Image (spheres, rainbow, N blue to C red):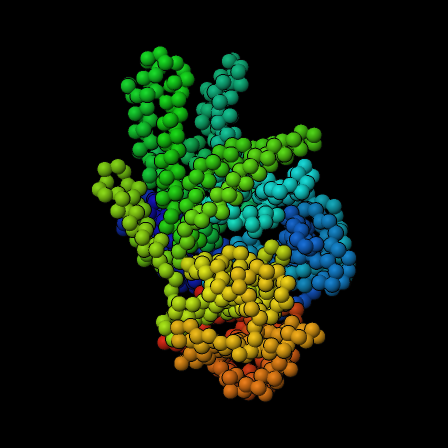
Amino acid sequence: MRCAILGLIGGVAWLQVQAALPGTGLQLICAVAAALAALVAAPIRLPVLFLPHLMRIALAGTAGALSNELAKADEGRDFDVIGTVDSMPGRLDGAIRFNFAVETPAAVPPLIVLSWYAGARAGGGAPPPELLPGERWRLRVRLQRPHGNANPYGFDYEALLLEQGIRATGYVRAEGRNERLAGFVPSPHNAVERARYAIRERIGAALPNARYGAVIAALVVGDQRGISQQDWQVFSRTGISHLVSISGLHITMIAGLAAGLAGWLWRKSFFVPDWQLPLLLPAARLAAIAGMLAAWGYVALAGFGVPAQRTLYMLAVVAFAVWLDRLSAISNVLALAAAVVVILDPWAVLWPGFWLSFGCVAAILYATVGRMARIEADVAAPGSDFNGARESGDGWWSGRAARLRENLRQAAVTQMAVTVGLVPLTMLMFSQVSLVSPLANAVAIPVVSLLVAPLALVGSVLPAPLAALVLQSAHWLLAALLDWLQWLSAQPLAVWSAPAPSWPMFVFALAGTGWALAPRGWPMRWLGLACWLPLLSAKPESPPPGALRAIAFDVGQGMAMLIETSTHRLLYDTGPAYSPEINGGNRVILPYLRARGINALDGVIVTHSDSDHSGGALAILHEVRAGWVLSSLPDGHPIVRASPMHAHCVAGQQWEWDGVRFEMLHPTASSYGEPELKPNARGCTLKISTKSGSMLLPADIEAPQEAALVASVPEKLRAEILLAPHHGSGTSSTPGFLAAVQPRDALFQVGYRNRYHHPRGDVLGRYLELGAGIWRTDESGAVSVEIGASPGLSAYRQQHARYWYGR
């Protein structure tokens, strides 16, 4: 059964990396092959024979989720929709973001995500009103198909929307009749969401302006939108991210407390001896029911989020096994729980949470099952510390102390198994492992799970005078803990980073981990940890001397490119600012650098002050060591102040790295004395040349600057690859400039359906007339460039094609 379920999970994982869903013929072949394998490889077992059918169910659910997508022809259209607010709205910079369950018209998918902006961004009008979950509204909306940035090692927003059943996104238009039609539409889902909203507001009222009030709300209702990026960084570096949400640990803890209390009261017959309740129903079965109800209630508070649902499914399988007295092998229960999760949520295999959750339990089982029983036997044996204290009359306290030591020993073994067992998986998924995680979790788990989370839950439902007191107590404990964790995360060796491993390297390290966690007596267990050396000591890959590698990130409407030579790295622009805390730097560039094992940049160029080019600079400079910064920014700019060494871009600057020549062509030194110039006019224009080819990066210069370059340095403009000036706007890419450059390929870093309509159709026509290849990040995702031994360009959405991209 376990092997068959592993095959099922592997089949679903294979399905989720396909460029297109398999056809009916291939589905039939796979089903027949799986059934034959089950018949030949093992005795006939009914659950095994059901697995091919379950695989078809998962495939049917995957295909069905795509069927409700907005039609391509309807993108950019305005619709008058009627429906209900389907989630707790979240506010950010005066805008509201929420899920909307559409009732009419039929052309709109049944579940969409909407943003309601204030002022001009919404086409004029007043700030958005307060929205409550469950309200019915009539709204005029403009929609588009699901789209997210597509970058190596980046987050797949389109996959998340598919998993949630959301097949269109859009925003509310100021025109039309945007009006509330009903205060509340009764339904179980709406009631849960309204309750979650009320609890979140109670927490906000009890903890106004509290430093970690958003973390308290996340622990109670699972709403993490208010947690700052700085706090997430601390959680990540200390390895406690799983504790600051309604995680599997908290759900299991609450379910365990409810089950233990219910079972104890049932065994005591609620202190009414005549009832003799255990004779009517065994206490273990009653405890399983109570635990499941508590878990269901807590998951409902989380809004039935996907990670919380996984834990609920796991607990349901365990409770079902307890009810049927079938807990013969815990590994069977774990495997069955994984099968349930994958069948009900085929996209679970795409997220680290699935693998970390089951990997954590598997590591504990592998390292402890059969060994803890021996430890407990040793404790109970004659002559042990526990029994020795009891027999010698040292008293009750001495015996309890011995038992406590053994419990701490078991906890240490469990923590060791988790820490060691998850190192390969953590490195594969995050390219880093927290060295302080064992210490941080040893303190944070009991504090958060046993104190902060229960106090927050109780405080959220108590009457007003008591609620504030209890919630403030929870916040005080949490603040003390997080202040210590912040200090811990700031230590130089808090995190070990290395490039994301290849699959052979990962498998080798995983085998070594199994060797290291083998039972005592297994020969040379320490050699298992030696298998980590390739994993932890890997260095970032680099092009050979004289060659150039670059990647134009998909940052939406903005510009950011990483250029690499054999031993040097340069970041050209840093992407846009999406919000005060989220930007192209921390959302796109830093995850890429981390996954590549790049923790230092030789140089950073911020071409000008527009936020779509400079928005991520501060985040980059805060996280990554930079040798120097070149920019056209004024001296008092925050990026200039944050730079380790700063200089203005000036035409004539040049340097050479590993046989690759870099030369600044624009702006001139005199332009800094012309205050009337727009920031675009001083865009740092960089020419990069190798023996095999060259690339020109002209930032956002416009027609006058292009003409000046053609007049002054026409011989230096020729380049095989051109980053289109100003994203392909109508003010740039003039015929004379393009004739001087003669690009073989043109890169356009633009946002999907951006409001500036970049690139302009007539501009694209000029490039096509020259025979240039067109590479757009809104269509291709990140574009990789190789100039040297194997020159060429490649698009991430083509190299990493997935069936939900729809292209």
In depth, the one of 183 and 238 nearer the eye is 238
User: In this orientation, which residue lies closer to the viewer: 465 or 707?
Assistant: 707
* Residue for point 56% across, 71% down: 749
Left or right for 183, reference 748? right
- Is residue 679 something that shows in the picture? yes
Is residue 319 found left or right of 149 in the rendered image?
Answer: left
Q: Residue at x 65, y 31 (%)?
A: 469
Question: Closest to the observer: 223 or 646?
Answer: 646
Residue 720 x %, y %: 47, 81
Q: Position of residue 562 (x, y in %)?
A: 48, 67
Residue 623: percent from left, percent from top: 51, 56
Answer above or below: position of 762 versus 335: below
- Count of marks placed on residues: 0
In percent of the image, x 32 and y 55: which residue is there?
A: 534
Q: Position of residue 304 (x, y in %)?
A: 56, 44
Task: Judge whether residue 341 can be spotted in this image.
Answer: no
Q: Quadrant of the N terminus?
A: top left
Q: Residue 32 falls in which quadrant of the image?
A: bottom left
Residue found at the very far left of the displayed protein: 523
Write the residue at 34% across / 16% down.
389
